[in-house]
Image: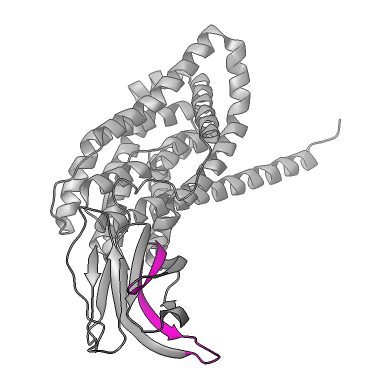
Amino acid sequence: MVYLTSKMFGKPFLILLLLVTPGEARKSFLSFLNIQNTEVLSFAKTEETVIVRSRYKQPNSSHLFVKIEDPKVLHVVNMTKTLLDVTDFTISLKTFPGETNLTIQLWDSEGRQKRLIEEIKNIKVRVLGQTEDSLFQAPMHVNRYILLAFLSMILLNKCAFGCKIEFQVLQTVWKRPLPVVLGAVTQFFLMPFCGFLLSQIWGLPKAQAFGFVMTCTCPGGGGGYLFALLLEGDVTLAILMTCTSTSLALIMMPVNSYLYSRLLGLAGVFHVPVLKIMSTLLFILIPISIGVVIKHRTPEKAVWLERVVRPLSLTLTFVGIFLAFRLGQVFLRMANGHVLLLGLLVPALGFMFGYSFAKVYMLPLPVCKTVAMESGMLNSFLALAIIQLSLSQPKAYEASVAPFTVAMCSAWEMLLLLLIYKGKKMVTFSTETEKSPLV
């Protein structure tokens, strides 16, 4: 336990004790009498227990009042009182990353009158974040069968994408790899520099700036070929670009992490999650390869898979956004206006750069769309893995805001673009129908 004590020279007084697990104990003493400077308590777990001890001579009529300045950082779950030689008030708290001020008052409620006995002011509470083991635990409980069904839908969807691969497109890209090169240059050179530049313009803290740079240097994610399908891009090219950029990430992500961490003044050893990158690549290639085999051996099943790929993709998109929001809501509480604006700009710049470069080289419209999707839809969770492996708490917690913000903003931007595209297509179709002569 950490004992935070004060001496009142015969007057009633309170002693505040912060309970921590064995191995985390540290000695720290806090005086509650004539506090001149704001004292700081640091929490590092989602649930903390605080004990307030009183030597007031009439404990039966006393009660405790806790005033929290920002309820988004601290929340009182329950409060109990134990009467021993001294009176202990046990306060169970739910914590979220951030800072707030805490006031604790001891009141006497004997009879009809209430009297303030003691007050602890100027307690500044700083919640640093969760421990590494519990960091990725979801702030919700999801049934395992629901998760299993969701995973099965993802694998089925990837198999369906494999049925849409055209080998003629693969041969064309092999001879003319310009779209793949444009996507790689945008993802690993232009986007990280833009993330670094914008974070410096807005004066973000070093940890958050590094988080945005790492997010910008990520390869394309599964959302790239999903939206390439929905927006009538080149699905085969999109899958090939995703696999290529994921492979290049094994080299380019450590290079960019080393370069920009030095520019930001963040010293340390930076780790790249090689196993996570390789598992991501296999998670794409294996089910898609199964889809290719199904297409060539049982074409009738491939036709059925191609029919369900669009509604299944839309369903997975909405479910993915919901789960990402629930998993990242703790981080998103730390996002201010500049972080949200940068989260909106990062995918928008990727879409714009990819489409513009492809248009300059006069590539076909479906290819332009695909390069744009692959440049803007980033695998943000690889950035999250790098951040958690490389930075110490609370910097890792602060930097993790970036990948979650970018992931949420890019998904909503793509859904908005999809609605606009489908609406425009419907208007065009109705106009052409009205102009066509009746038979």
Is residue 336 in view?
no
Q: Nearer the viewer, residue 181 or 211?
A: 211
Percent across and percent down for residue 73 are: 40, 67
- Residue 70, percent across and down? 42, 73
Q: Quadrant of residue 88?
A: bottom left
The magenta segment is 85-114
Across and down, in percent, residue 226 comes to 50, 35
Judged from this view, the residue extending furthest toward the front is: 85
| Left-right relation of 55 to 254 | right
The secondary structure making up most of the magenta span is: strand
Say which quadrant the C terminus sits in. top right
Residue 350 is left or right of residue 4, and the answer is: right
Reply above or below: 305 against 223.
above
**Residue 432: quadrant of the picture:** top right
Residue visible at 38% across and 38% down in the picture: 220
- Number of numbered markers: 0
Question: What residue sits 71% from the left and 40% below the top?
Answer: 429
In the rendered image, is residue 374 in sight? Answer: yes
Q: Position of residue 116 (x, y in %)?
A: 42, 89
Residue 87: in magenta span: yes
Q: Is residue 81 above or below residue 184?
A: below
Task: Decide: is 426 above or below 144.
Answer: below
